[in-house]
Image (tube, helix red, strand yellow):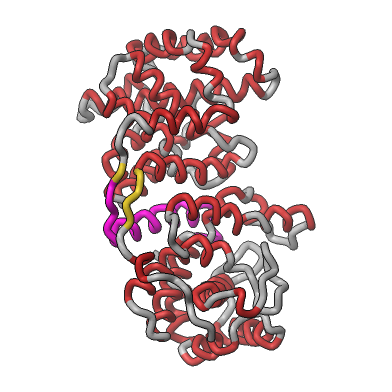
Amino acid sequence: MIPTHASASAYEGLSIDLGKAAHTVTKALDYVGVDDRSHGRRVGLICHRIAHNLGWDRPTRHFALLAGMIHDCGVSSTATHNKLVESMEWEGADDHCRRGAEFLRAFPPFAEYAATIRHHHTRWNRLPATLDPQTRLLSNLVFLADRLDVARGNFLADHHQNQVLASRGQLVEILAPYVGELFSPELFAAMEQAVKRDGFWLELEDEFLDQAIFETLATWDHSVHLRFDDIMALGEMISRIVDAKSPFTHYHSLRVADLAFHTSGLLGFAPQRRQMLRLAALLHDVGKLRTPDDILEKCGPLTAAEHDVMLRHPLDSKVVLNALFPNTPIAQWAAHHHEKLNGTGYPYGWSGEQIDLETRLLTLCDIFQALCQKRPYRDRLQVGDVMEIMERMVTASEIDPDLFELLRSHAAQLYTIAIREG
């Protein structure tokens, strides 16, 4: 086995910019839209611009920005995303609001946004009386910004982007009949003023969007120091979003993480090194948020085109994880878990010593859990069948033979971990 080159400093707590973390999580969530990859970021910026017209103070404006960016953290499937952009209201919308609030409560730095996200599809005239006035306004602001962006997106489906400025009045009029029922009159009036500025619409274009967000974030200090427990909570939050994408991948990331943590203990890894590998395992499939549901849940073989779509997810994962956890090996371990020792893997076709020990172990755990888990094209395999398949992979020089022997000697115990639910 080859030594790892991860430094000890990689396992210490991290200081991160919470605003940039929200932006990165949002970019990952925007993958769910497949063809529309900026919805969350646009909603965040719209929230901030309307809040500015309301005269809200800077901390509250920035709260609105971050809440808007992460508002769809409960949306994992493209089917749900499509429902949310097809009509003004959707009967099933509350499900993702509830799920998103649950995810946010699990990560302490984002927990304060949970109440706002919980009600961001609740009508203005039906918001619970128990909510404090500010949370009522913030929730409804996210709802209003979300629906405005959906109206904009539907308009652009039939028109050129340059026509938005001339048609801004039409977009506002789409929402006007719902004032007092869906939307707060106060918020709607502030929106009417905000949209008069050309820059409001131009900054929503992909060419200018991130620059506008980062310039806004720069006016307020969002830096926080995360203890390792907080970092793990962030990883678990994101992994739950990924695993919720399909009933056939439910718990996959969590179980791969459990397997990686357990087997790295058998190898004698130091505690912090084990935790870092667990974090990479939790997030190894974050790029699959971009993969359409019908590919992940297809019962038959993938077409060549569908297979090519699947080949993208390691690099999508790498982009997200490098932004979230810079100067750590997390992105590398996660993004390379489909490489094979004989060079037949993807996306780089690495081989031999190019693949470090942690990546080899993560690869093994991912394959083992996937074979143990029920998938749309087959039922769960028994442990003997799993071992037989993986032994053929050893013979083909695809996976590490020493790690496989470790797995085989503890197969019954690891199988119990791999199939656990909840």
Question: Is 414 within the magenta?
Answer: no
Q: Which one is nearer the viewer's eye here, 197 or 188? A: 197
Residue 342 horizontal/vertical position (percent)? 70, 79
Residue 202 horizontal/vertical position (percent)? 56, 19
Residue 300 horizontal/vertical position (percent)? 73, 61
Q: Residue at x 62, y 68 (%)?
A: 338
Q: Residue at x 41, y 36 (%)?
A: 71
Q: As displayed, is residue 293 above or below residue 408?
A: above
Q: Residue at x 47, y 41 (%)?
A: 26
Q: Residue at x 32, y 33 (%)?
A: 116
Q: Which one is nearer the viewer's eye here, 169 or 362? A: 362
Quarter of the picture containing the C terminus is bottom left
- Which image quarter: residue 325? bottom left
Q: As displayed, is residue 284 above or below residue 92?
A: below
What are the residue bounds of the magenta stretch? 224-250
Left or right: 272 with respect to 367?
Answer: left
Left or right: 77 with respect to 275?
Answer: right
Q: How many marks?
A: 0
Residue 251, can we see it? no
Q: Which one is nearer the viewer's eye here, 381 or 392? A: 392
Residue 89, can we see it? yes
Residue 79 horizontal/vertical position (percent)? 58, 42
